[in-house]
Amino acid sequence: MPLKRSDPKKPSPKKKAARPDHWDESESEFESESETLSSSWEESEESRRKKGRPQFRKEKRESPRRRPRRRQESESEEEEQPRRRRRAEPRRRKETESEEESEDEDEDEDEDESEEEVMEEPRGTIELRIADFGNEEYVPPKPKKYKLSKEPDNVQRFVKLIQTDVDPNEEDIDRDIGYFKGLSPASQDKLLSKLRNKVEPAVATVPLKFQIMAKDVPAEVERVAMAKYQALMSIDPSSTEYYKANQWLNGYTQLPLGVFKDLPVRIEDGPGPCQEFVSSVRQHMDTAIYGHDEAKLQILQFVSSWIANPQAAGNVLSIHGPPGVGKTTLIKDGVAKALGRPFHFITLGGATDASFLDGHSYTYEGSVWGRIVDVLIKSKCMNPVIYFDELDKVSDTPKGEEINNLLIHLTDGSQNDRFQDKYFTGIDLNLSRCLFIFSHNNHEKVNPILRDRMYNIQVAGFGLKEKLVIAEQYLVNSSLREVNLFEKISIGKDLLTHIIEEFTGDEKGVRELKRCIQTVISKLNLLRFYNDPEKVPFSIKGFALPFNLKKEHIGLFLKKKGGLDPSIAHIYT
């Protein structure tokens, strides 16, 4: 029902709306406050009029067309107002209760609330939404200058690989294709191989737990490793203990426990293949070094026992003799290559204590396993050839005695199947099938207990006849090949005899002889590139390849052992 229009000159008194029954005193207080504000506004308006000040700006009168709708809105607002108050009442009560509770809270909670208010999103912020373009199909750029269908296969493979590896633009592809086509076929194949290895995905690594369980080890060893793994899972990754446990497990998984490399023949194959294999072992040793027949026969006995019984324990061999007679060459280039086993060299001369061989305890920070375990990890088998050099150089100090005692345990056939590194405590390492070879120059300086555990072979020095054979068949040819002068320089037997008698002294080995031959050939190699008589003291007039070396030339290249330099010899005459 529309309201009656009141006379603007005579304002009708405002009627108070009927109060609903559910109103309380808070609503009446709210109404009285609104009336007070209205009366204060009228008084301020009257006072401003009396003082001659401008009145407050009146609201713009509405057009008659909008009045009916405004009346309807006012009626609906009057009807809706009680409902709003009823709905606001429970919320107002909750706010009152929350205010009372907040007064009892401590200062820390108030500070937390203020921080939360600061973290609220301020007005006027802009929310950015980034679209997901990951589902779009990648289209690699194509070259402009080259038509791939007409290019060789190598070029097409090259383009596919670089498009997979990187995201180049078209100009880069054209430039790379031009460079690739300018390479030689061998260089192209090498580059394609590198790109292929880089692009192909790596083989998925086996989880650490499965690596531990995959090892063929006794149950007690597996329990030790699994206990370390469980400890690793319960340690904070940022702690040093986590690093130590992780390093221990990584080292354990690399140990070739239970892995042995057998000979290529067995006794079941018959006498023919076995005889051929033994003959090939002897040929390898003869090619590596001249002489040493007794040592070679002893090694052939070891090989024969391994053919008859692949599970036979390894043997301990000791070779002693003067320096320079080829002890190391015999084992490294002869025995190890003939057997097809990994060869590792351990020098005892610089060892300070036994921890060099059996490692340090896991308890200490930065501790590592010893040299024996390192050899096994690199060999990837439990029966490599281990060569200990300079056994007589172990010191007589208490630290040196520790090394000797460890070597005694290592060479004891009744104990070396349970060798333990200090780092891997609780894990037995079966070294019974290893081939241990020791070399030394002075037999008397070796620990007597250790000496009794070895099969000792004495290697005598070389005489003149043997040195000539070694020089002709080994030293001269190898030195000429190193500088690409093979079959271009002729050195007769009489010259070699002259060098041995005049420049090597009473040497029992061939180290000094090898050094003299290398010196002569090295200076001849210089003369073919630079033969200035004013700058080169050993210049030869008319030098040209091929060249036949003569006795008078030797004096230009070599000096007698122990002789004085001519530039200072006059001082002592």
Image (cartoon, rainbow, N blue to C red):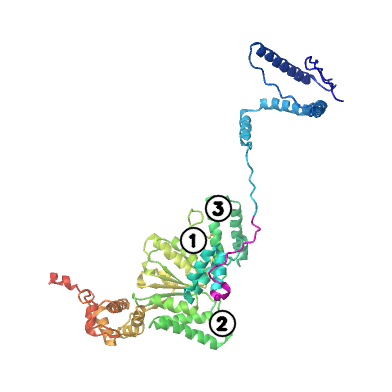
Mark 3 lies on a secondary structure that is helix
Mark 2 crowd level (few <14, some 14–19, many ≥20, 10 Å Cα)? some
Confirm or deny contact between disc 3 and disc 1 (CB under 8 A): no
Where is mark 3, residue-wise? 242
Question: What is the CA distance from the residue labelled 2 to the residue labelled 3?
Answer: 47 Å
Where is mark 2, residue-wise? 266
553 and 546: which one is in front?
Answer: 546
Quadrant of the image occupied by residue 393: bottom left
Give the residue type that dot 1 points to. Trp
User: Measuring 22% from the left and 80% from the top, which residue is drawn there?
Assistant: 555
Instruction: Judge whether residue 431 can be spotted in this image.
Output: no
Instruction: Judge whether residue 274 can be spotted in this image.
Output: yes
Q: Residue furthest bottom?
A: 272
Q: What stretch is highlighted in magenta?
A: 133-154
For the stretch drawn in magenta, the main secondary structure is: loop
Please, is residue 52 above or below residue 119 in the view?
A: above
Q: Residue furthest top?
A: 50
Quadrant of the image occupied by residue 329: bottom left
Give the residue type that dot 3 points to. Tyr
x and y percent of residue 279 in the render? 48, 86
Question: What is the CA distance from the residue labelled 3 to the residue labelled 1?
Answer: 17 Å
Whether residue 147 is in magenta: the answer is: yes
Q: Which mark is residue 369?
A: 1
x and y percent of residue 137 in the render? 64, 61
Give the residue type that dot 2 points to. Arg
Mark 1 lies on a secondary structure that is loop
Mark 2 lies on a secondary structure that is loop
Whether residue 81 is in magenta: the answer is: no
Quadrant of the image occupied by residue 478: bottom left
